[in-house]
Amino acid sequence: MARPARLYLPSHFGAGSRVYGAGAQEHASGQADFLLDDLADDGQPLAAVTARLASDLFQAFNAVGTLQITREGVLQQEAWGSQWPSISRWATMAGIPTNPPLQT
């Protein structure tokens, strides 16, 4: 018998993690199609594909989706917490847009 899978979201309000989703799912499946060109280079197209793939995976397990990146490939500052300084440096180098936009 398959064991239930749980997705965890680190808690910004204290130590530990919490279950991310309405309930643990015994199993899930999904399918995703992407253009190879979007997977070939760093930047917003790759970030958008990553967001769509991760969101679809989260939703297959009855979770809301990713908070850190939109389906358009825009990084959401408030969802990254203390990791934002390093993420914003990487976003600048990779040409990935952020919300709010980075000051240049």
Image (tube, grey):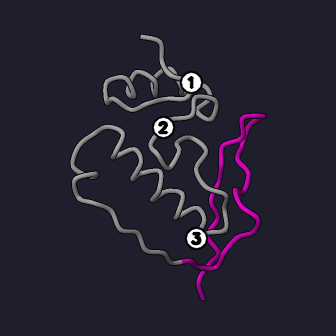
Q: Nearer the viewer, mark 3 or mark 1?
A: 1
Name the residue carrying label 2.
74
Q: Are marks 3 and 2 in contact (CB under 8 Å)?
A: no
Which badge, 2 or 1, comes first in the chain's sequence? 2
Report the magenta stretch's main SS.
loop
Q: Are marks 3 and 1 in contact (CB under 8 Å)?
A: no
Circle 1: is it few (<14), some (14-19), or many (20+) Cα within 10 Å? Answer: few
> Circle 1 sits in a helix, a strand or a loop, which is it?
loop
Extent of the magenta region: 1-28
In percent of the image, x 49 and y 56: which residue is there? 54
Most extreme residue toward the bottom, as rendered? 1
- In this figure, what is the number of numbered marks? 3
Amino acid type indicated by mark 2 = Val
Say whether residue 13 is left or right of residue 64.
right
Whole-percent x, y for residue 45 in the image = 34, 45
> Circle 3 sits in a helix, a strand or a loop, which is it?
helix
Amino acid type indicated by mark 1 = Pro
In percent of the image, x 54 and y 57: which residue is there? 55
State yes or no: residue 96 in magenta.
no
Which badge, 3 or 1, comes first in the chain's sequence? 3
Task: Looking at the picture, tell me which residue is in the foreground, 55 or 84.
Answer: 55
Q: Which mark is residue 100?
A: 1
Name the residue carrying label 3.
60
Say whether residue 45 is left or right of residue 97.
left
Whole-percent x, y for residue 25 in the image = 66, 75
Relative to 31, residue 57 above or below: above
